[in-house]
Image: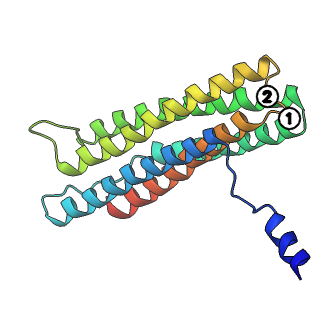
Amino acid sequence: MDRNINLLQEEPQQTLAMHPKKFALWLFIVSIVMIFAAMSSAYMVRQAEGNWLDFEMPTIFWVNSGILLASSVTMQWAYMAAKRDNLAMLKVAMIITTFLGLGFLVGQWYSWVALVDMKVFFAGTASNPSGSFLYVITGLHAFHLVTGIVYLVIILGASFQYKIHSKNLVRMEMCATYWHFLDILWIYLFAFLLLNH
């Protein structure tokens, strides 16, 4: 009996372990979610007050969504290549993902140009709160996407130095997680704006 009690006491307890950098990334992601949740809530409250301009979303928003979804596919391709130590494929996929991310930012600029052409402005006497919210929400997402592109470039550089491979995947996993999150965030924002514009 005493022997069984001793065996139970000696067994190490399992702990939930997460790499500290991954934990920090998840905290950062949660803070971004909170920001956009607050923006969505403010949007709905202000829309309910009236004086709200209804307008069609520019077609470029659909194109941008397709670009970002494609970048998620290439990001996953890069991650799988790193897991399999296919370093040549990893570099190709990371380069394509980076260019797709840059393509999204260019498309975002053109979406703002399209909004101006539709007389939807950010601020000023001719502006309406609906336009201002749209610019702020899409601009804030674009800012976070720039941080994602910086991360992509860092990982791309590391892949050319052979620092990303199956035995060293933490940074690659973090990059993929953050990039997929930004893509999911955009799909949410786009759907939200489509339903509430």
Q: Quadrant of residue 110?
A: top left
**Crowd band around label 1 with a 10 angstrom C-alpha radius: few (<14), some (14–19), many (20+):** few
Q: Position of residue 124 (x, y in %)?
A: 12, 36
Q: Nearer the viewer, mark 2 or mark 1?
A: 1
**Residue lying farthest to the bottom in this orientation:** 1
The residues bearing labels 2 and 1 have C-alpha atoms spaced at a distance of 8 Å
Circle 1 sits in a helix, a strand or a loop, which is it? loop
Left or right placement of residue 82 versus residue 37 in this view:
right
**Residue lying farthest to the front in this orientation:** 2
- Does 162 appear above or below 6? above
Residue beneath disc 2: 164
Name the residue rendered at 62%, 41% in the picture.
Answer: 20
Q: Quadrant of the N terminus?
A: bottom right
Q: Position of residue 143 (x, y in %)?
A: 43, 33
**Does the image show residue 59?**
no
Residue 63: image tag: none
Residue beneath disc 1: 167
Q: Quadrant of residue 141?
A: top left
User: What kind of residue is marked 1?
Assistant: Lys
Name the residue rendered at 59%, 42% in the picture.
Answer: 178
Name the residue rendered at 71%, 24% in the picture.
Answer: 156
- Does 182 appear above or below 189? above
Circle 2 sits in a helix, a strand or a loop, which is it? loop
**Does the image show residue 112?**
yes
User: What kind of residue is marked 2?
Assistant: Ile
Left or right placement of residue 123 versus residue 153 in this view:
left
- Does 84 appear above or below 192? above
Viewer-proximal residue, 7 or 140? 7
Q: Position of residue 116 (x, y in %)?
A: 28, 36
